Amino acid sequence: MITKKDLCKLIFILLLLVCNFSFAQSDFRFGLKAGISIPNLQSSGDNPLSSGWSSRQGPYIGVVTDLRLDKNLYVQAELNYSSQGGKKDGVQAIPVSPEYASFFPEGVPVPAYLYSSYSSEAKLNYLELPLMLKYEYPFSQKFSVFVNGGPYVGYLLSAKNVTSGTDNIYLDKTLTMPLLPAPVSFDANTDIKSDLTSFNVGVQAGIGFAYSLGTAGRLILTGGGNYGLTHIQVDPANGQNNTGAATITVGYLVNL
C-alpha cells in the first residue's frame, strides 16, 4: 500500500526529473498565478463537530511551470499557497469540557455535546505541490483551451479557528434548556494546528483559456478545484473532514 510519505517522495522525484529535463528543452514555461480559493470542509460520518460547514473565501497564489511533451500534451507542476477551511453560523455542537461538566449535579449523566449559537471560521492554509498532465488545443494563433489534472501533496502551514458571538450554553439543539446563569462570549482566535495532520494528499484539476503574447509569453485564465483525500483531524473524536476548494486564477507565463 502506498503511504502519503511514499507519494510525497514520488512527486518530488518526478519534479526533479521534469526540472532536469526542462533545461535541455525549448518548450518550457515559467510564471506566476493569483486568484481566489472558495473552500469548504466535507464531512464523513455524523459527528456534529465536523458537519455543517459552508464555504469561505481566501487567497490562492503560486508559481507554475509547464513542459511540452508532445504537440498538445504538457506536464505542469505548481507550488501554491492554498486557503482551505470553512464557516459555520448558528447552532453548533460543543464538546463538554471539565468546566461545563462541573455544572451538572453529581449522579446526573453528562452528555457528549452541548449547544450554542455563534459564528465559527476555520482558516487553514496549505503549501500544495500538484503535478498534472495538461492537454491544450489551439483554436487560433492567439487563443487556446486546455484541461489539466493530477495528484498533489500539501503541507499545513497554519490553522486557526476564529469564533465570535455571545450566547448561553444549552443542553439541547433547539436552545430551550440553558446550562449557565448568563450568556458567555465566544470571541476567540484559537490555534488548532496541533489538532490536524501536517500532510494532505489529494487531486487537482482545471480548465482554462490561454492568450499568446508571442515571444513575451502568455496570459492564462483557469477555473478548477482540488480535493483532499486525507481526513485532516488527528483525533477521530473530532470528526472526519476532507479539504476541498473551487479556484479561479489569472496567470502569466514566460517562455524559457
Image: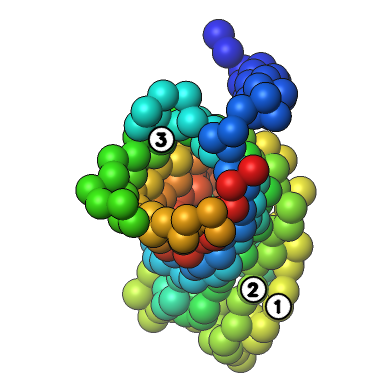
How far separated are the C-alphas under marks 1 and 2? Answer: 6 Å
Task: Check disc 3 and report the residue beneath it.
Answer: 134
Seen from the viewer's position, the closer of residues 253 and 123 is 253
The quadrant holding residue 44 is top left
Give the secondary structure at mark 1: strand
- Residue type, numbered disc 1: Ala
> Residue 162 at x, y = what percent?
64, 73
Residue shown at 41% from the left, 50% from the top: 225
Q: Which mark is residue 188?
A: 1
The tag earlier along the polypeptide, 1 or 2, is: 2
Reading the chain from its start, which is encountered first: label 2 or label 3? 3
Q: Rounded to the nearest whole Å, what is the CA distance between mark 3 and mark 1?
A: 43 Å
Q: Which residue is mark 2?
A: 162
Q: Considering only vertical position in the picture, is 144 above or below 179? A: above
Q: Is residue 125 visible?
A: yes
Give percent across and percent down for residue 124.
63, 58
The amino acid type of the residue labelled 3 equals Lys
Q: Residue at x 47, y 24 (%)?
A: 69
Q: Nearer the viewer, residue 249 or 1?
A: 249
Q: Nearer the viewer, residue 207 or 103?
A: 207
Q: CA distance from mark 2 to mark 3?
A: 38 Å
Q: Position of residue 49 (x, y in %)?
A: 50, 55
Q: Quadrant of the C terminus?
A: top right
Residue at 37 percent across and 28 percent down: it is 71
Secondary structure category for the residue under label 3? strand
Amino acid found under the numbered disc labelled 2: Val
Question: Cβ–Cβ below 8 Å for labels 1 and 2?
Answer: yes
